[in-house]
Amino acid sequence: MIKLSSRMWLLVAMAAATAFLVACAAEKEAPTAPVATIAPATPKPAAPAAPAPTREPAAPAAPAAPAAPAATAKPAATAKPAPTATKAVTPKAPTGSIVVAATDNGIAVGTVHLCLPGCENEKVMYSGFETLLRVTADEELVAHLATEWTLSPDMKKWTWKLRKGVPFHKGFGEFTADDVVYTVNSANTKITKDSIHDQASDLVSYGETVKIDDYTVVMSMLTFDANGPWSPWSPIWQTIGMSSKKVFDLYGTDGMRGVFVGTGPYQIVEWITDDHTLLKAVPNHWFKTPAVDQIRVVEVKEQASRIAMFETGQAQVVEAPVQFLPQLAKKGGVPLQTGSRQFVVRFTANYLDFINPVDGSPVANPGYEKAKGKAPWVADHDAPGCDYSVYETSLPEGPVCKEIENARKVRTAMAMVIDREEVVEALQYGYGWPDYINYLSAKSPYMRDEWAIPYDPEGARKLMAEAGYPKGFEFQIWVGDNPEEHTTAVAGMWEAELGIASTFDRIDYSTKRKQWVPREAADAQMEFSTMGMPPDKPLGGGSSNWGLGGTAKEGGNPFSRITYGLMAQEPDPQKRIEYAEAWWAHYDHWKWIFAVAHRPLFKVYDSNQLVWQPESKSNNGLLWLYPLEDIVWK
């Protein structure tokens, strides 16, 4: 077998990606999709035909939206403020239409407790559903569907006062406390046991939400949660939009799957998974009446096709990789950064947390049981001489047995043969930077020099030999539809330097999630993870049993359980950061997950026709189109 160097694997990855793009660019356009609300099973060609943007005569003026009352409790912002955007002139009523070319248009599920990843954030991104709170462009937390929010003295209850007079779409009545109770309790796995909601793991500290009167609700907490009220009650990070209880009462669990009724500036008229989403402006909206009457979001996975649609006028907004920004600028394309992502490798089958932190009951981890002692990167901590307690501290405080240490050496070796500088330069065209630690940017002031992973193939081979794998091994890893150039390059470096032969699992996210939720996955994964969290946001919820019922793709360990419990209950931001630093040190040592590269995300709009100066903000790259209501005609 001919072995390629790491540099050659980068070139192979680039060539494969380029060939793929050229082939995709040559594909014919697809006909317009039929009206439907649930996705067809058949695959869709790359670039659906899109009408040119239209402008209509202005309609009569809409009344101004009422001003939002000030909140009674507003925590200090954790991110640095940004300059306030200059407000564009908004027409009196919605006119015209535009097309957005997106990599993914999400997963269309209207039923709250069935709204899996790919669904909830997208409802808010489309400005179809609204959140209790909003974050301004200068990162101030302000009232939205809620007008006041108050934390009880014992830090165990949030009391929310709700805005009066906000109508749901399609004549489903006024937004009230019943809708908040329905939405939050449906997403919460402690209340709705079969919930697979996207943000279920963000509600781990919450008990039941109850109605006090038509415009007041109380959310009880099992423990204080330092994420609140920012997350998930505003779009700054993972978020929850409010759904209608009347819709659920009318249609039921199955009937509501294809029904989308929110309160946002846009109404979701159609949403066909893997195809398109059609949005219609809501006239006289309580918060802000959009300028653009109709927005059609088409899913076009091939980036060459998206770029071509923008250049030929078929799309006025496009999700664009950084290397195309200069090219799009020649056509009037103006970029707006929508966040950033971190390319990570997760050794998922290390499900090492066996306790439910809420009630102390034992938790089974089938994926770990299948992988332990078989996968070189998963240790059997029950082997003779091993002590599970070494996982319970930031760094081991006692001797570590050979079984556990060898698995760590394998994970460390796999991190050391990745040439991160070349990944950024060759695959990201110099945009971004190398990263090393899960959920920590290398540009962060909290990054330590000793956490940087050296590019050291020789040292890595030595570790592999010490662990008993001098010739490598076979390695199955889920990559889904993540960028082929990144996954191919990293896997190629493992094979070239360590003899690790990777097999890619490309099944779709929603199918793979059925293994992650019950912790049955016995493999690893590579993907781009969304960044942008404040440094004191509680860590470890997704990598411990605090996230039971959620997407357990990060594996799990007892130190994450301990860390999340401490951070979530700690009101002092500086102490939360100290806990975070101990958690980052833990991940640097054990390499349960390691990062490869940091990549900024951009959306590009056609400045020949549009002005887009966002007055609301999200750091969640999954909400990359938010806020659509701030697009105006030039």
Image: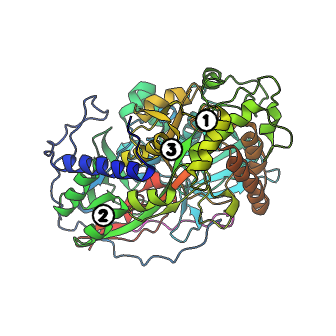
Q: Which residues are magenta?
A: 64-77
Q: Which residue is mark 2?
A: 324
Farthest residue in the right direction? 398
Q: How far apart are the two marked residues, 3 and 1, measured between alpha carbons?
A: 45 Å
Predominant SS along the magenta part: loop
- The disc label shown at residue 188, or none: 1
Residue 334: x and y in percent read: 32, 70
Residue 75: x and y in percent read: 69, 63
Along the viewing direction, whichever of 113 and 79 lies nearer the viewer = 79
Front label number (2 vs 1):
2
Report the residue at 26% width, 58% height from top.
Answer: 293
Task: Check disc 2: other Cα within 10 Å, few if <14, some if 14-19, many if 20+.
Answer: some
Whether residue 222 is visible to the viewer of this picture, yes or no, is no
Quarter of the view holding residue 580? bottom right
Report the residue at 29% width, 60% height from top.
Answer: 317
Give the secondary structure at mark 3: helix
Whether residues under marks 2 and 1 lie with C-beta atoms below 8 angstroms apart, the answer is: no
Quarter of the view holding residue 360? top right
Going from N to C along the chain, the mark reached first, 3 or 1, is 1
For the N terminus, the image quarter is: top left
Residue type highlighted by circle 2: Phe
Report the residue at 71% width, 47% height from top.
Answer: 589
Whether residue 366 is visible to the viewer of this picture, yes or no, is yes
Give above or below for 363 relative to 410: above
Along the viewing direction, whichever of 479 and 165 lies nearer the viewer = 479
Residue type highlighted by circle 3: Glu
Task: Check disc 1: other Cα within 10 Å, few if <14, some if 14-19, many if 20+.
Answer: many
Q: Which residue is mark 3?
A: 497
Along the viewing direction, whichever of 547 and 223 lies nearer the viewer = 547
